[in-house]
Amino acid sequence: MKRLPDTELEVMKALWAQEGGAGRAELEHALADCGWAANTINTYLSRLTEKGFVSCEKRGKANWYAPLVSQADYLAFESSAVLNKVFGKSLKRFVASLARGGGLDDAEVDELQRYLDELKEGRT
């Protein structure tokens, strides 16, 4: 898997939000805030299809697009890549960076602790 440019990631997010796939009209509506022309969205969909992230199927006169990569799989890939590249595979350094930057409040720290406890319990 390869990292997607931000623009193509926006298209994927819109597609993931449309459970089961979507036609181009639905995607254009979902991406209206981006201000892209229909041809631009078409270009991004073509690139995503070429990269194996999206399938394109003809349904009548329209194309139907469906994600071939789940959001969970892509998020796991991206998270791992950032952790490896920026933090030398150190989750501790990543969390410490968030904490120093004020990116974690007490509720988030508690939530993270509960999640880590659950992970630990699942291994025993």
Image (cartoon, rainbow, N blue to C red):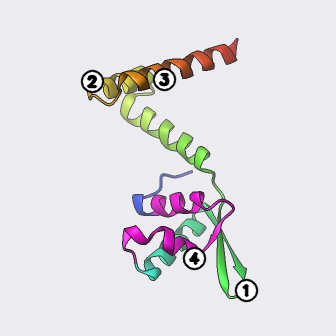
Q: Residue at x 32, y 24 (%)?
A: 99
Question: Which badge, 3 or 2, is on the more N-terminal residue?
Answer: 2
Q: Which residues are magenta?
A: 8-36
Which kind of residue does numbered mark 4 sit on?
Answer: Arg
Mark-to-mark CA distance, 4 and 3: 38 Å
Question: Which badge, 4 or 2, is on the more N-terminal residue?
Answer: 4
Q: Residue at x 68, y 88 (%)?
A: 61
Q: Disc 3 on helix, strand or loop? A: helix
Which kind of residue does numbered mark 3 sit on?
Answer: Leu
Instruction: Tell me whether circle 1 and circle 4 mark residues in contact (CB < 8 Å).
Output: no
Q: Residue at x 60, y 44 (%)?
A: 72
Assign the magenta stretch its main secondary structure. helix
Q: Is residue 13 left or right of residue 101?
A: right
Residue 100, labelled with which disc? 2
Q: Which residue is mark 1?
A: 60
- Queried whether the magenta region covers residue 94, the answer comes back as no
Q: Position of residue 16 (x, y in %)?
A: 59, 57
